[in-house]
Structure formats: structure tokens, C-alpha cells
Amino acid sequence: MFVFLQFQHLWKLCYLLLVVMCNSKMFKYKIIRACTVPQSLGFVTGMLPDLQKKYEVVLLSSSGLEWEEVRRLHLDVKCIEVDMERHISPIKDIKSLWQLWRTFCKEKPKMVHSMTPKAGLLCMLAARMAGVPVRVHTFTGLVFPTSVGLKKKILMVTDWLTCACATHIIPEGEGVKNDLLNNGITKKPIRVLGYGNCRGIDLERFDKTPEVMEQAEKLRKKSVCTFIVVGRIVGDKGINELVEAFVKLNKENSATHLILVGCYEDKLDPLKSETLNLIKNCSAIEAVGQQNDVRPWFAAADVAVLASYREGFPNVVIEAGAMGLPQIVTDINGAREIIIEGENGTVIPSKSVDALYSAMKHMLDTDYRDGLANNARKLIASRYEQGFVRKCLCDFYDKIL
């Protein structure tokens, strides 16, 4: 009897200890945030301080130089490198799937949350195989709507498989959500968090501070209307049409200037040779390459342009809006949700040189341009402020974990 009573007291003590741990900072669910390449880790690292208050966060991505900065800034975060090819590569994909399965079996996370297409497919498959209870994928953009033929079918199957293996699906915007549902990719209940976007904007950083304006003054061209494009300088971003439209406008009005901020991708999606020649030979076009800080460039411009064929929820449109720029965007997912026609910019058809030319020409009207600019920052602040976006994600995690 004495032994039984002692055992009973010990059992109660263990139970109470477990309850205390589960309701204190001693116990935290382990979650793995994964993306295909480390360049995309920026979507996650900004939220780490908030997430780490409640969860043990592990970052996972392919190898790359970007890991050095992540490890330097976040010494207390475990980082795992598993190489994943961005494009279809059956042998390498199988190897990555095996490595991910072994990783998840070893780490035993409560949740795996993936972003970007290849990480989504491989991580959701591996997590399901490893018995991870909560599997979340965020669709930041879809490739299949603008693809054709066999490629389109393959992409639809991979997105379907990602959704089939996930327990929860987050589309970054209403456009992505509608594409997933209308094309039969999934029948699972899915919803956009907040107004969309998975990062949010730091309004204190993206502002026309004296420091930023001092740098912008050195970059600004006097007495001209400056258009700016920030992003990869590739065909899929509509750069071929944009450059052609701008050159036409510049021939009519020399008081125009175009800044291209971003890197070329000659292997993946090269520009047409005619476009490269126009950029080279037009003195009003300035290609400045990739920049670590785009704020001075935004501040040196008058109008931001997104001529892309497809997006998920373009952060560059949010950033430009936070910097008070009126915008010209194509009628694609995400962009049409951020830009309200006649309020903070204008929305035009994609792949149209004439539409880009007309929109840029209209922006030369100072009164029209200033009216849009006055609304730009206020609209972004009301929907995409970083704290609000993070709270939406944390509330979602609290609900599913």
C-alpha cells in the first residue's frame, strides 16, 4: 500500500510538471520553416523574434552564401541545409526527398511550413512520409496559369500533389486562391491571411527619411519624370514590352528617364537581343544592377512600374507604395489587389506595349501623378503593416497547433 501511494504521488507530480511545462516557456513546439533557396529566407527571418517567443524555429533551405548572414544575425536558430533544385530534375529531386525525410524523422517537428514551389512539393511529401502532424504550404505565386502544353499539365500535377500532402494551404492573395480552386488543384478549405502578403512592410524602414533623401538627391535626374522597375530583369517580368514602350515615349518626350534595378538571368529567362540593344543604346535608360538598399532608388523616382506576366503577391509593389510612389501594374494576381485603379495607381493588361506606353504617358501629368502619390503610403499602411501581417500568421499558428 505504501509503495502504491508513493507511486500515486509521483504520478501526480509528473502530471503537474507536464502541465506547467506545456503552459510555460519551457515547452515549445518545434516548427520547421522551409524554402527552396536561401535568398527566400528573408520572408521568414523578419518574423523570427515573434515566432521564437512561442516556438522552437528551425530554418531549412538549400546551401548558399546567404546562410552566412542568417547565421550571423540569428545565432540561436538552428539552420539545416538540404539542396533542392528549382527546376525539374528527377534524380536530384529524389535525393532531396530522401534527405528531407531523414531530416524530418530526426528533428520530429510538430509542423513543417514550406514556401516556394519546389520546397513545397518536396517538403510536403517528405513531411507526410515522416508523419509530421501539421503540414502547411504557402503559395506565393503560381506558374501554371501562364504555361502551356505539357509543362502546364506537369505544373498542375505538382501543385495538386503539394496540396494533397499538406494539411493546411495558405494562398498569398485572393488571385492565387481563385486559381487554385477554379483549376481544381485542391478542394480543401483555404483562406488568405489578412489582406494577403506573407511578409508585411516595415513602415519605419521604408520611409523618406532624411538619410534616404540625401542619398536619393545624388541619384535623382533633374527636370525629368523618372520611372523605376525593381526586380529581376527578365522576360517574365515584362521588361521586353516595358523597354519598347519607354523608348517610344522617350522619343516623343526626352524629359523621361527609366531606372532598371535588378540582375539579368541570361540562362533562365534572357531578354530579347532587341531589348538588350535598346537598353544599351538609349541614354535615358539606366540599368544599375542589383542593389542592397532600394529605398534611395525609389525616393529618386516618380513612378514605379511592374510589367510582370505573373506574381503571387509582389512585395516590390508594397515597398514602392510605402515610399509614396504612384504605380503602373499589370492586371495579375497580387498587384491588382494592392493597386486600386485611380487611387494609388493604374492597372493595365499584361504583355501590352501600347498599354504601358499610354499609362506612362498619362503619368507625365503632374497633377494626376501627385494625386495618386498622396494616397500611396496611407493605403499600404492600412493593410500591409508588418505587425499586422505577423499577427495574422501567429494567430493562424495558434489555431492549428
Image (cartoon, rainbow, N blue to C red):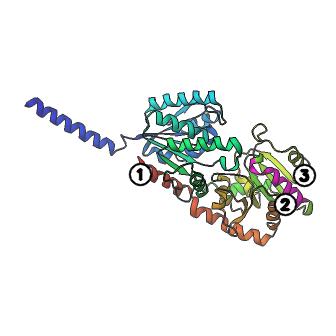
Q: Quadrant of residue 30?
A: top left
Q: CA distance from mark 2 to mark 3?
A: 15 Å
Circle 3: element type: loop
Q: Seen in the image, is 59 located left or right of residue 363?
A: left
Residue at 47% from the left image edge and 37% from the top image edge? 128
Neighbour class for label 1 at 10 Å: few (<14), some, many (≥20)?
few
**Residue 224, percent across and down?**
85, 62
Q: To which residue does mark 1 refer?
A: 399
Circles 3 and 1: CB atoms closer than 8 Å: no
SS type, badge 1:
helix
Nearest to N terminus: mark 3 or mark 1: 3
Name the amino acid type tagged 1.
Lys
Mark 2 or mark 1, which is nearer to you?
A: 1
Residue displayed at 79% across by 50% down: 239
Note whether 366 is above or below 260 in the view shown: below
> Image point 61% across, 54% down: which residue?
179
Q: Amino acid at mark 2?
A: Lys
The disc placed on residue 298 is none
Q: Earlier in the sequence, mark 2 or mark 3?
A: 2
Q: Residue furthest left?
A: 1
Question: Which three-letter amino acid code belongs to the residue tagged 3?
Answer: Ser
- Stretch in magenta: 236-250
- Work out whether residue 116 can be spotted: no
Sort mark 3 into few (<14), some (14-19) or many (20+) by Cα contacts within 10 Å.
Answer: few
Does the magenta-highlighted stretch encompass residue 314? Answer: no
Seen from the viewer's position, the closer of residues 386 and 35 is 35
Numbered badge on residue 222: 2
Of callouts 2 and 1, which one flags the residue occurring earlier in the amino acid sequence?
2
**Which residue is under mark 3?**
283
